Image (cartoon, grey):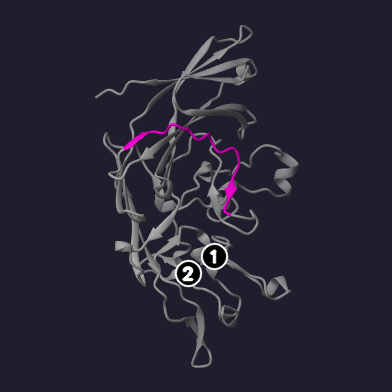
Amino acid sequence: MFTVDNRTPYAAERTSIIDGRGAVLWVVVVKATYDVAADGSTTLAAEQVGPVLAPVHHGDPARSSLLYETDLVPPKPLTDVLVCGFAHAPGGRPSAEFTVGLEIAGLRKALLVRGERDFERFLGTVVRPGPVTPVLRVPLVYERAYGGFDDRDPDPARQRLDPRNPVGRGVAARSEHLVGSPAANFEYPGADIGRAGPAGFGPLASHWKPRSDYAGTYDAAWVRTRKPLLPTDFDERYFNCAPADQQLRGGLPREARLLLLNLSPRGTLSIAIPRVHLRYTTFFTKAARQRHLHHRGKLNTILAEPELDRLTLVWSTVLDCGRDVDHIEATRIIEKEAIT
């Protein structure tokens, strides 16, 4: 019981969750891994990467940014588009400043990359970034974006934290605390770096804003009236982990491509997004009121990892089968032929 009959070449996993009504939902996730060629064409990878079962960080979870968010979530309101890897200077030559970006299905995003700079003191009182050292590549991590946590003062009231990116650079309770520390490499072009917030292409941790704002209110009233159910103000946008400007609305066109600018060692890379059509059928034991149910999935995540020549797609489906949840036998997954 409670198994997945996966008849596709992709990896699959399942779980159950409790929604805000207290109903148990059956969630099945499918993950497809593709090799990306130099021309951006994709072929099914010999090794299929399994769904991520728990968040994976770049280092200490308490002090580093997120590398991969868990895939075991219900269908997201929007499709996350993520890129993990490095920003590469054009032409393979170190540069003091260059642009990186992505584009897919009408979604466009560009960031400015600056070389290495340290904060310096000018005219005795002004603290600002000093001369720039050109860079060949910069890791796509939020440790290189604006943000941070200044806890130099033992008094918590005199500390400063950026809840949008606690692991970043540039935030300080006092400007002199920045002297000698590195400035952010990534920023939104033409925008105030502090107001625009952290600039990056990877997933945001669930306890960072704005995701934490969607988690709901866990106060004394929640403990008294709803625990362990989700708060009444829980928002499903919590499940989206990409920056807001990397969340794709609507479906993909027939021949969708993900265009990456200076996010690949090749410079510009246009990745073909495979068309995949999945069908899910959940079967129940004889004790259930129903024999089987057909249900649909949704494309949750598009993840490009140019350094690995890899593209992964993640779909999720959720089934509310009421009291029959205890009688689930298995969910069969098949791939349907695309209609041209």
Which amino acid type corresponds to the residue marked 1 in the rendered image?
Gly
Magenta span includes 201: no
In the depicted structure, whether residue 14 falls above or below residue 118: above
Question: Measured from the top left, where is residue 57 in percent x and y?
Answer: 58, 51
SS state under label 1: loop
Q: Position of residue 114 (x, y in %)?
A: 40, 70
Q: In which quarter of the image is the C terminus?
A: top left
Q: Identify the residue at horizontal 58%, vertical 62% (top origin).
A: 166
Percent across and percent down for residue 240 are 49, 45
Residue stretch in magenta = 42-58
Q: Which amino acid does label 2 sit on?
A: Ala
**Left or right of 30 on screen, residue 103:** left
Q: In which quarter of the image is residue 279?
A: top left
Task: Find out whether the residues at labels 1 and 2 contact each other: C-beta distance under 8 Å.
Answer: yes
Bin the neighbour count of mark 1 within 10 Å (Cα to Cα): few under 14, some 14-19, many 20 and up.
Answer: many
Viewer-proximal residue, 308 or 319?
308
Q: Name the residue under label 1.
A: 168
Please report whichever mark, 1 or 2, sits nearer to the chain's N-terminal start: 1
The answer, for residue 28, to whether it is visible in the render is no
Q: Mark on residue 184?
A: 2
Point 71% across, 39% down: residue: 227
